[in-house]
Image: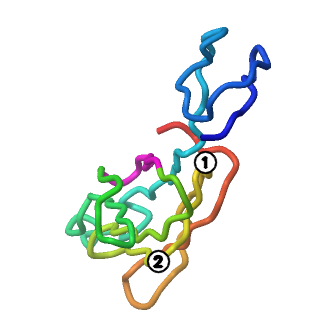
Amino acid sequence: MAMIKCPECGREISDRAASCPNCGVPIASGKKVKIKMPKTAQMAQGWIGLLSSKKAVVYDSNGDILWSRDHGHTASFEIDNATKISIDLGKWGKVNDEMVFPGKNYVLLKDYGVHMVANFKLSEVDIIDAD
């Protein structure tokens, strides 16, 4: 356990505290990772887009699911350390073995691939627009 200063009152508190015991201000955990997922239309167009999966799933290196939801949403999950992830965007899009860090925001950028499969790369950003 490390001690940090409360951003509101300046008192030293545990880095694991959900809020400051002195003034009550919530303490950000700093462990949350956010990744803006592409919309289905950004991956495959026309009838191919209609046939592709609409699900996005983020896995850790052990194959455990960290987050799962439809395309176009922002993945949000907590990690303690730098973590290698893979993202399955359905049949037409995949991101393999990318490293993410606690407290960082990312967006998936389209990197045109071979044939009709869309390749994406992870790029760190400061702010993510709301869903």
Residue type beneath disc 2:
Asp
Image-quadrant location for residue 41: bottom left
What residue occupies the far top of the structure in this picture?
A: 23
Residue at the spot 72% in from the left edge and 23% down from the top edge: 6
Left or right placement of residue 80 versus residue 39 in this view: right
Residue range in magenta is 70-78
Secondary element at image label 2:
strand
Instruction: Give residue 34's position: percent from left, percent from top.
Output: 52, 49
Instruction: Give residue 70's position: percent from left, percent from top.
Output: 30, 51
Residue of label 2: 97
Tell whether position 74 is magenta: yes
Lower sequence index among marks 2 and 1: 2
- Quarter containing the N terminus: top right
Instruction: Give residue 8's position: percent from left, percent from top.
Output: 75, 16
Residue type beneath disc 1:
Gly
Residue at the spot 77% in from the left edge and 14% down from the top edge: 9
Q: Is residue 32 above or below residue 19?
A: below
Q: CA distance from mark 2 to mark 1?
A: 19 Å
What residue occupies the far left of the structure in this picture?
A: 51
Q: Nearer the viewer, residue 120 or 103?
A: 103
Image-quadrant location for residue 88: bottom left
Tell whether position 80 is magenta: no
Most prominent secondary structure in the magenta stretch?
A: strand
Q: Is residue 22 above or below residue 118?
A: above
Q: Are marks 2 and 1 in contact (CB under 8 Å)?
A: no
What residue occupies the far bottom of the structure in this picture?
A: 114
Residue of label 1: 103
Instruction: Give residue 57's position: percent from left, percent from top.
Output: 32, 60
Residue at the spot 40% in from the left edge and 71% down from the top edge: 86
Left or right placement of residue 9 versus residue 22 in this view: right
Q: Nearer the viewer, residue 16 or 36?
A: 16
Q: Is residue 34 above or below residue 21?
A: below
